[in-house]
Amino acid sequence: MNILGIDVGGTSIKGSIVSEKGEMNEKFVYPINKNENQEECMQSLFKVIDEYLSKQLVKIDGIGIGIPGTVDTKKGMVTYSNNLKWKDLKIVEFFEKHYKLPVKITNDANAAALGEAKFGAGKSYHDIVMITLGTGVGGGIVINDQLFEGNEGKGAELGHTTLVLDGLPCSCGRNGCFEQYASATALIRQTKEAIEQNPKSVLANMCTDESMIAKTVFEAARKDCPVANAVINQYIHYLSEGLLNICNVFRPQAIVLSGGISKEGKYLTDKIDQYLAKFAYGYPYSPKVEILISQLGYNSGIIGAASLLISQK
C-alpha cells in the first residue's frame, strides 16, 4: 500500500508518497498563491500533484490530507481555515472526483500526532498526546492506537484550554489560553519583555537576531544568565502546567513535543519531568507520563496524513 500524504500549511502545501511502513518518497512543495480563490488553488495543486505522480515509480492507493483550521471529517470539508481563507471547501469531493481514489482528511495537528504514534516517537505506545510548540500550540490525541478527533473532527484543541483565568487575549476570542503562554510566540514575547527590563544583560547582548530569539534565550540560560534563566523557568512553568492538565485528564503513556522549541531536547524534557513528578495528581502512585521529543520532525504531518489510510501501527 502506498498513500499520498499531504500537509497543508499557511504558505505552502507539501506532500509525498508514503509506504505502509511509514517510509517517504521524495517530496513536492507547492507555494500557495494567496491571490487564488480556494477552487483555483485546488486546480493549481492538482497540476503540481499530477506532475509529481507522473514521475514516481509506484501507484498510490489513496490520499490523506492534514489541514490547519476547523475540519469536518464526516462531511470531508474544511469548515474554515483562517490563514488560508478557505471556507466550506469540499476538499474530499474535489480530490475524489479528480483522482478516483479514497481520500481522508483531518486537522494538521491531528495528522502530526498520528504520524508520531504510528511511526515516530510514540510507536511503542498505545496512548499518546502530541503538543506542537510553534506560532500557537497545537494538539493531537491518540487513544488505543486510534486518532481521537471529537465531534465532527473538531476536538483536541488543547492549545485553547484555559491556563490563566482572565489572562492574555487569544486569537480565538477567549483569554488566558495555553498557547498564549507556552507557544514559541509566547516565549519570544516573554524574552522581549525581559530584555526591555534588563537591557544590559547577557541575554540582551545575545538577542541581536529577531528570528533567533526563542533559540537564543535557551543558549543564554545555558550560560547561566540570570535573566534568561528567569525567562526559561517561567516559560517551563507555564508549559508544564499545561502538560500537567493533559496528564490529569488523559493520563497518556507519553506526551510528544514537536516544533522548534522541542529541539532543546533533554534540557527541556528534564525540567518538565521534574515539575510533573512534583505536582502530578497521585504521584508516585499513578503511572509516569513519558515526555518525548518528536522523531519525525517536519515530516510528521505528511506521514500522519498518509497514516489516515494505513491501518496497522
Image (spheres, rainbow, N blue to C red):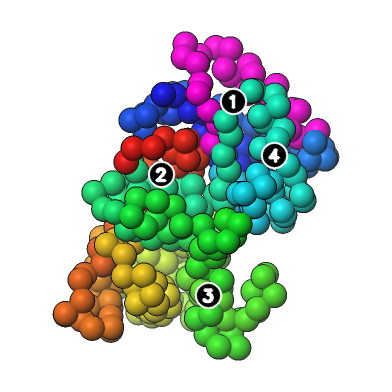
Magenta span: chief secondary structure? helix
What type is the residue that disc 3 sits on?
Thr
Query: In the image shown, does 294 or 6 lie closer to the viewer?
Result: 6
**As drawn, 68 above or below 49:** below
Amino acid type indicated by mark 2: Gly
Instruction: Indicate whether residue 62 is drawn in magenta.
Output: yes
Q: Estimate the spatial distance between the alpha carbons at disc 1 and disc 4, rounded to whole Å.
A: 13 Å
Residue 161 numbered tag:
3
Q: Earlier in the sequence, mark 2 or mark 4?
A: 4
Of 310 and 41, which appears nearest the observer?
310
Of marks 2 and 4, the one in the foreground: 4
**Other-residue count near label 3 (Cα within 10 Å), few / some / many at <14 / 14–19 / ≥20:** some
Q: In the current view of this chain or complex, which residue is farthest to the left?
A: 284
Question: Where does label 1 land, which residue?
Answer: 101
Q: Is residue 85 magenta?
A: no
Label number found at residue 91:
4
